Amino acid sequence: MNYELTYSLQNKYFATFSYSKTSDNITDVLKPTVENGNIVVVQTNDNLSSASYLGLYLIAPVKVTKWWDMNNSANFYYGSYTGSIADTYIKNREILHSMSTASILLSLETALQPSLQEITEQERSMLIWI
């Protein structure tokens, strides 16, 4: 089951709330197996009992100056996974977020469109210039 609700303020700012719950979710897993008398770890597909997702996605454009536009977005979500893989019961929950901004700089002679994007997941962070 999936639900999504989007709200628009002045057709400029957007907020989307989403929820989904999946039973017998097929996912990639790493699990030990015995091959030729040796224990090896293999990557395969397996079913988890359930997977749930709750998210909030925000979009907010900003006009910094008459020659500088900025498009900003943020995504916050909570994921929950339960099931049994390789005789191990899994109940994993995590809260993640990502944020990005794209700038458009305009001059009289040329139009420059640099984009600075910040991607953050838990404690990892990187900046990318495009």
Image (spheres, rainbow, N blue to C red):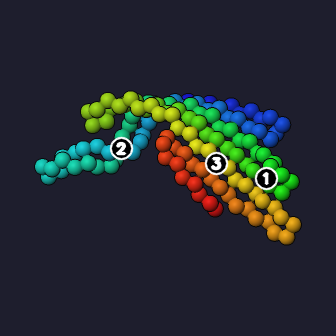
Residue 106 appearing in the image: yes
Estimate the spatial distance between the alpha carbons at disc 2 and disc 3, rounded to whole Å.
Answer: 30 Å
Estimate the spatial distance between the alpha carbons at disc 2 and disc 1, rounded to whole Å.
Answer: 43 Å
Closer to the camera in the image, 34 or 74 = 74
> Which residue does the numbered mark 1 point to in the structure image?
69
Amino acid type of the residue that numbered disc 3 sits on in the rendered structure: Ser
Secondary structure type for disc 1: strand
Disc sitting over residue 29 in the figure: 2
Q: Earlier in the sequence, mark 1 or mark 3?
A: 1
> Callout 1: 10 Å neighbours few (<14), some, many (20+)?
some
> Which residue does the numbered mark 3 point to in the structure image?
100
Q: Quadrant of the N terminus?
A: top right
Question: Position of 108 compared to 51: left or right?
Answer: right
Disc sitting over residue 124 in the figure: none
Residue 51 appearing in the image: no
Residue at 18% x, 50% y: name it. 35
> Callout 3: 10 Å neighbours few (<14), some, many (20+)?
some
- Where residue 116 sits, quadrant-wise, is bottom right
Residue at 60% x, 50% y: name it. 118
Query: x, y (%) of residue 104?
Result: 76, 57
Q: Quadrant of the C terminus?
A: bottom right
Question: Position of 8 compared to 83: left or right?
Answer: right
Tell me the mark number nearer the camera, choosing from 2 and 3: 3
